[in-house]
Amino acid sequence: MEKPFANLLVPFDNSSNSKRALSYAIKLAKLSNATLSLVHVISYHSAMAKIVQPYKGKMISHVKQFLKDAKHSAFKEGILVNQNILYGNPSEELLNLMKKKKFDLVVMGRRGTTKITGPSLGSVSNALVQGSKVPVLIIN
């Protein structure tokens, strides 16, 4: 029998919503013996390069640490994890990645690290729901 999910994409920004999404993804991966692909996109625009440059090293170290912690959570459950850090517009980079690699499901939080609140989806989750060719599971 074919696995229902073999490769799950989990956009991860270390927000409480993305941590809950990771928890759900780990459960789904255990049920179907799937691989998780943890991805963080560092929002980057060339116009901001000079401003961001002095902080780039600290930013990358911070991202690597929280991805390492997330990966460890999945490893403890026996889940194989790939991780990747991308640079650019988060929505565009994730959709491009989804075109290049085969994912069966995207599991992500409703909203990321922004402080904007309300009943709507965040811009990245909305873009993936609108642009994805595979199912997107949004976790509240």
Image (tube, rainbow, N blue to C red):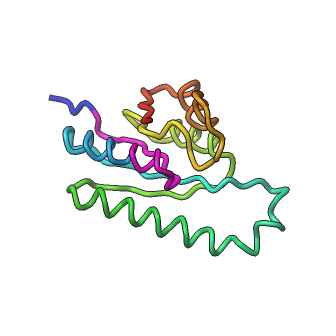
Instruction: Please determine whether, in this image, residue 91 is positioned above or below residue 73.
Output: above
Q: Quadrant of residue 127?
A: top right
First to last magenta residue range: 5-21
Q: Quadrant of residue 118?
A: top right
- The verdict on residue 6 being magenta is yes
Frontmost residue, 38 versus 126: 126
Q: Is residue 28 left or right of residue 21?
A: left
Q: Residue at x 46, y 50 (%)?
A: 16
- The verdict on residue 70 being magenta is no
- Which residue extends farthest front? 118
Frontmost residue, 16 versus 9: 16
- Image location (x, y in percent) of residue 111: 55, 40
Q: Work out which quarter of the rendered image holds the C terminus and state it.
A: top left
Q: Residue at x 43, y 52 (%)?
A: 38
Q: Is residue 73 left or right of residue 50?
A: left
- Image location (x, y in percent) of residue 92: 64, 40
Instruction: Please determine whether, in this image, residue 51 is positioned above or below residue 79.
Output: below
Q: Residue at x 43, y 45 (%)?
A: 10
- Image location (x, y in percent) of residue 93: 61, 45
- Image location (x, y in percent) of residue 81: 34, 55
Q: Residue at x 14, y 28 (%)?
A: 1
Q: Quadrant of residue 50?
A: bottom right
Disc count in the image?
0
